[in-house]
Image (cartoon, rainbow, N blue to C red):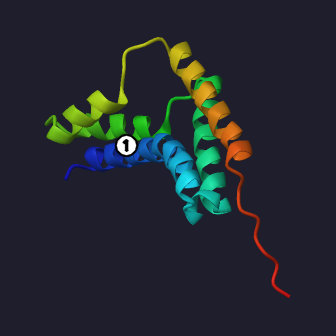
Amino acid sequence: MMAADVVLLIHLSYVLFVVGSLPLIWVGAILKWPLVGNPWFRYLHVAAILFVVAESLLGIACPLTILENNLRALETDRSFIQHWVHKILFYHLPEYVFTLIYIAFAALVAATFKWVPVRKRSLKS
């Protein structure tokens, strides 16, 4: 597999974690899954979307996109993975649209902390 494709699949995994975790938390709250109250999972999730929001507000390109583009410059063939994952991840819209979406999504993630609280760790004596 080409290095750029590996980076692209890592990027896709990051996006799936950020986007997919929110409905997972909601469904898990209804079904009483312990994972949804896990502080490590929840704080990692909110940190992941806040990183994206910060990048967007600061006008910084995603490091994974930069790395992939640099690796693509060294490779000549367009891959099957590149073709389809790019269709999933990348859209041609003005940057401010993405920034607004990221901020709204982060607000929803933050609000979910109130709706589905993080489980407090019990102190053992």
Residue type at the position of mark 1: Leu
Q: Quadrant of the C terminus?
A: bottom right
Is 40 in front, or is 78? Answer: 40
Q: Nearer the viewer, residue 70 or 85?
A: 85
Residue 63 left/right relative to 106: left
Q: Residue at x 63, y 39 (%)?
A: 109
Place of residue 86 in the rendered image (x, y in percent of width and height, measured from the top left): 29, 31
In the image, farthest residue toward the bottom: 125
Residue drawn at point x = 15 percent, y = 39 percent: 80
Residue at the spot x=32%, y=47% of the render?
Answer: 9
Q: Is residue 36 left or right of residue 7?
A: right
Determine whether the residue tagged by mark 1 lies in a helix, strand or loop. helix
Which residue lies most toward the top here?
94
Task: Find residue 83 and report its horizontal and vertical position in percent.
Answer: 20, 32
Residue drawn at x 59%, y 49% as measured from the top left: 45
The residue that disc 1 covers is: 12
Give residue 70's position: percent from left, percent from top.
Answer: 35, 37
Sort mark 1 into few (<14), some (14-19) or many (20+) by Cα contacts within 10 Å: some
Displayed quadrant of residue 36: bottom right
Residue 98's x, y, as percent? 52, 21
Give the total number of marks visible in the rendering. Answer: 1
Task: Say if 3 sits above or below 59 in the image.
Answer: below
Q: Quadrant of residue 123?
A: bottom right
Q: Is residue 90 left or right of residue 85?
A: right
Q: Is residue 100 above or below residue 76?
A: above
The one nearer the camera, 81 or 112, is: 112
In the depicted structure, whether residue 78 falls above or below residue 100? below
